[in-house]
Amino acid sequence: MSFEETLLNEMHSKSFNSAVYQKNFKKRPHISKSNIDASSNAKHLKTDHSITVLYTNELVQRYVAATQLIYDLLFSVYELNTTSLFCARIYKPTETIEKEILKFLKGFHRPNFEVRIIGLQNGQKYPTLSQIADLTTKYELPVVEIDLFGKEARHIAMDAKLGMSFNILMEDRLYKPGELINNTTVAQFERSLKK
């Protein structure tokens, strides 16, 4: 069972974006920032960019990191048979995202996909999420993890070897209560994208 139908149904609720919305099979584990940065095997993904990673051995890139994830959305598609990972970090709906996803999807014969959707803040409108949800339906992509809204910034690492998501411990220690609360306004966030 996956969560794409649940997401599509519950997105129409008036209270959908008012609190943390999570669907997953197990709690996301932690990983230290020093661990993912070791041997330069991590790629840090900026907003409005995407990347494809093929994990073949310990010498190639293993992690895609999306730090300070607040008003944007991290969307990943993992193909289990080949350890191939596509990640996109997007803020507003874009025509190019479907082309990029389709290019990734066409590369496999009898694929076994897993989709993860992470990001956004409480009260935020979600046209980008709607676009991504429509694409998961259109291409019959099973969603195995959803982590949306809330008041905290997220620091996420996607693992191309295991297909898992991790919470990055940015200072190599567990966070104190309230430490991840987002104090950046939408206007400040949008200005940061123009730099």
Image (cartoon, rainbow, N blue to C red):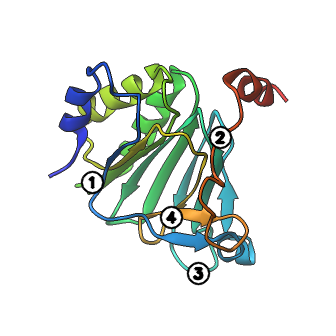
Q: Which residue is mark 4?
A: 166
Tell me the mark number nearer the camera, choosing from 1 and 2.
Answer: 2
Q: Nearer the observer, disc 2 or disc 4?
A: 2
**Mark 4–mark 1 distance (CA, rounded to whole Å):** 28 Å
- Give whichever of discs 1 and 2 has the lower sequence position: 1
Tell me the CA gap for discs 2 and 4: 19 Å
Label ID, residue 154 = none
Q: Which residue is mark 2?
A: 182
Say which quarter of the image contains residue 53.
bottom right
The image's mark for residue 109 is: 1
Looking at the picture, which amino acid does disc 2 mark? Asn
Q: Secondary structure at mark 2?
A: loop
The answer to which of marks 2 and 4 sits earlier in the sequence is 4
At 70% from the left and 37% from the top, the residue drawn is 183
Q: Does the CB distance between marks 4 and 1 fall below 8 Å?
A: no
- Which x, y percent locates residue 177? 59, 59
Which of pointers 2 and 3 indicates the residue nearer the eye?
2
Q: Where does the C terminus fall, quadrant-wise?
A: top right
Judging by the rendered image, the residue that carries numbered circle 3 is 58
Residue 148 lies, with reference to residue 15, above or below; the image says below
Q: Earlier in the sequence, mark 4 or mark 1?
A: 1
CA distance separating discs 1 and 2: 42 Å
Sequence-first tag of 4 and 3: 3
Height in image: 141 above or below 175?
Answer: above
Tell me which amino acid carries mark 3: Glu
Which residue occupies 23% across, 44% down?
3
